[in-house]
Amino acid sequence: MLEQVIPFLTASVILTLMPGPDVVYVLVQSIAYGKRTGIVISLGLVTGVLVHTSLVAFGVSALLKSSPTFFFFIKMIGAFYLFYLAYKAFKAKPEINLNQTDPIEQKSAWYYYRQGFFMNLLNPKVLLFFLSFFPGFLWKDTQLIKQFYLLGGIFIVQGLLIFSSIAVMASSLKKYILTHKNALQTIAYVQVFMFSLLGILILFS
């Protein structure tokens, strides 16, 4: 068992650290809104991983792979959700509030959790990646569902630790941002660009 779990953990850490939409999203949002928001988004992202793990474990992912129409439908939902996030980032007024006693309107933790969850859940590439990645680390032919969930749990824990660490480190850049007038607007443009780019990549992948 350890002969499979240790290589799986190593591969998972490497894959999570590779620059990608999840890492960029946590980084940018943490800089803009603080480490708490980044950690909440991280929780949403890894919850999406739990759903993908369940789909792989129970074989629903095979339906997505064998049905081009269903896969195309899921892909469209994911792409348009990213375009919606790009629009929201474009329309939003970029600001950072460091005064915790200030009653300025602030989005709830539930809002950011949902963003992370749906961003992960509606990306069909994650599901197909798990479909091709997880089976290679199974160590026996029985109790497959339990093995999938164990591997999924390992992936979730390491992902949460890495994303949360990124959120904490990113939040330290707030002071720099507040001393540079154009920094927040630049972050907003980066968010619009990244959401739009990810949507386009999903559409044409």
Image (cartoon, grey):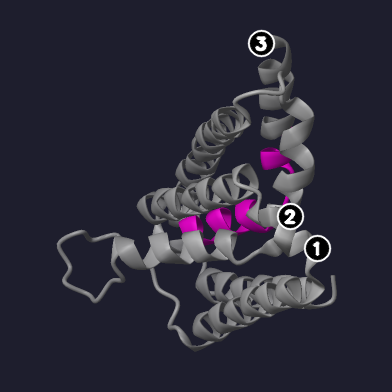
Cα–Cα gap, marks 3 and 2: 27 Å
Q: Residue at x 63, y 82 (%)?
A: 80
Q: Residue 114: x and y, percent? A: 42, 65
The residue at which mark 3 appears reads as 2
Q: Residue 41: x and y, percent? A: 45, 55
**How packed is label 2: few (under 14 Cα within 10 Å), some, or many (20 or more)?**
some
34 or 99: nearer the eye?
Answer: 34
Q: Residue at x 55, y 29 (%)?
A: 146
| Amino acid type assigned to the residue bearing label 3 in the image | Leu
106 or 158: nearer the eye?
Answer: 158
Residue 179 in view: no
Q: Residue at x 47, y 41 (%)?
A: 164
Cα–Cα gap, marks 1 and 3: 33 Å
- The residue stretch that appears in magenta: 14-31
| Amino acid type assigned to the residue bearing label 2 in the image | Ala
**How packed is label 1: few (under 14 Cα within 10 Å), some, or many (20 or more)?**
few
57 or 124: nearer the eye?
Answer: 57
Q: Residue 156: x and y, percent? A: 53, 38
| Amino acid type assigned to the residue bearing label 1 in the image | Ser
- Residue 197 position by quadrant: bottom right
Q: Is residue 189 left or right of residue 42?
A: right
**What is the quadrant of the N terminus in the image?**
top right
Dots 3 and 2: beta carbons under 8 Å? no
Cα–Cα gap, marks 2 and 1: 6 Å
125 or 201: nearer the eye?
Answer: 125
Q: Nearer the viewer, mark 3 or mark 2?
A: 2
Secondary structure at badge 3 equals: helix
Which of the two labelled residues, at mark 1 and mark 3, occupies the earlier sequence position?
A: 3
Secondary structure at badge 1 equals: helix
The residue at which mark 1 appears reads as 66
Which of the two labelled residues, at mark 3 and mark 2, occupies the earlier sequence position?
A: 3
Dots 2 and 1: beta carbons under 8 Å? yes
